[in-house]
Amino acid sequence: MENFKSYKGLQIIGPFQRFTAIIGPNGSGGSSEYKINNKVVQLHEYREELETLGILIKAHNSLVFQGAVESIAKKNPKERMALLEEISHSGELAQEYDKQKKEMVKAEEDMQFNYHRKKNVQRQLCKLYHSEVEIETLNKELASKNKETEKDKKRMDKVEDELKEKKELGKRMQEQQIEKEIKEKDSELNQKQPQYIKAKKNTSHKIKKVEAAKKSLQNAQKHYKKHKGDMDELEKEMLSVEKARQEFKEPMEEGSQSQARGLTLEENQVKKYHWLKEEASKRVATLAQELEKFNRDQKADQDRLHLEEWKKVENEFEAARKQATKAKKAFEQIKKEHFDHFNACFESVATIINEIYKALSLNSSAQAILGPENPEEPYLDGINYNCVAPGKHFWPIDNLSGGEKTVVALALLFVILSYKPAPFFVLDEIDAGLDNTNIGKVANYIKEQLTCNFQAIVISLKEEFYTKAENLIGVYPEQGDCVISKVLTLDLTKYPDANPNPNEQ
């Protein structure tokens, strides 16, 4: 045998018995050989050449293998959408669509991120502004407090002046009092001075008398007792006078020293107070100037930093916004192209499928409806396929009988063929699930399409189907040493149609 299943080239096998099993590697296509005009080519080249002829393998617009109709009937909305993408070639834009969408989403995320950064800087600037307003308010309050302090200082200076005046007045009054006391003491002294002089004279006289007495002591021993009392009395008087003089002298000296010390102490305290006050004022003024300069420098630095940060964030946001706009524009462009490609196919298919279904059903009340789940971007979601079978209500395709599903699936296949016509259309036992009535309807529809350069090759085992053909190719067994297959051909155009098209009657 030659090129049988997975066996490439000419292979000799045997002997055969009544029941023989042939085994080998799975025919997954890996061992297939593709030729164009007897030239071996790669699979992708083979498919590209088929596409130039309008043959789309995945779209089933030229080859419908056995069981394919049933699988088409069972397709879910997402798979039907993929089928339309295949025939519209809009799927070729899907990769670019996804790429542009990712870039747009990333650009929008970057823009959103920079927008939030910008808002954050705005909030910081707003907070800074309110802080500056608060600082300005505090500065005004500080200025007000300084004014009050200045007023208090003036009042204090006034009080100090008054105190100074009072001290001067007190000093003068004290001096006057001292002078008064001195005068009083002088007056008292003057009053007692005669007594003192008298006492002094008396003392001198007594001393002289004592001296005389001493000299005359020896001579006046006898008078000793008599004069001793006088001497004691004179001594007492001298002590009394000396005591009085000391009592007068000590208060005078103590009063003068105390007054002098008090005056000296007060003057030193006043001088020290004024010096401390002056130094404190100088220090406060210096610190105030340094603080003001520091605040100015700090504010200038902060303003410069915030301005630089704001400009940087603003530039980054503007760049992100432009990038997002550019990405969105590119995405919208590819989205429009994707939509236009897909929608052009979908609108055409959705319009034609109803007519084809009516023709297949031979019933004007039959309806077939294709509807996108996502009208804005139909290629992102599924395509619903619903119909109204002859004599029935509106039903989804899943609720139809097997034969009705086959007719509905064939309607979709013929729509694909009408949108993307191929040089030929091979149908492998598509009538397996049809009853005789529906077989005749499908066969008549295919026969009608022959007038539109439509070449159909149908593999069928049902007479109701193949008798509608123009040419018939049969395969039959022939007995010999072993059973071999033979082929016969028959031109049915030479024979009248036993079952003419009802539309032609």
Image: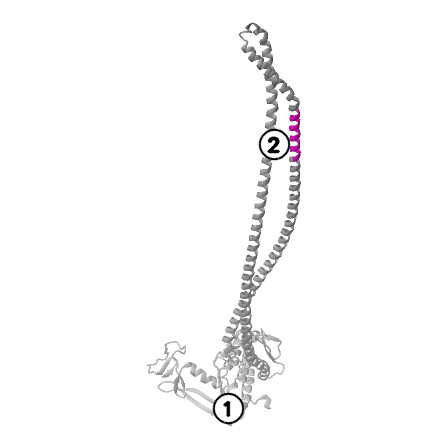
> Quadrant of the rendered structure where residue 270 is?
top right
Give the crowd class for mark 2: few <14, some 14-19, many >=20 residues within 10 Å. Answer: some
- Nearest the camera: 502 or 318? 318
Residue 403 higher or lower than 115, as above or below: below
Percent x, y for residue 482? Answer: 36, 85
For marks 1 and 2, give the CA distance: 155 Å
Split into 4 quadrants, where in the image is the N terminus?
bottom left
Q: Main secondary structure of the magenta part?
A: helix
Is-magenta flag for residue 173? yes
Residue carrying label 1: 470
- Nearest the camera: 63 or 265? 265
Q: Which residues are magenta?
A: 172-187
- Nearest the camera: 138 or 465? 138
**Badge 2 element:** helix
Q: Which mark is residue 259?
A: 2
Between disc 1 and disc 2, whose residue precedes?
Answer: 2
Percent x, y for residue 34? Answer: 40, 83
**Badge 1 element:** loop
> Quadrant of the rendered structure where residue 307 is?
bottom right
Percent x, y for residue 178? Answer: 64, 30
Image depth: mark 1 or mark 2 in front: 2
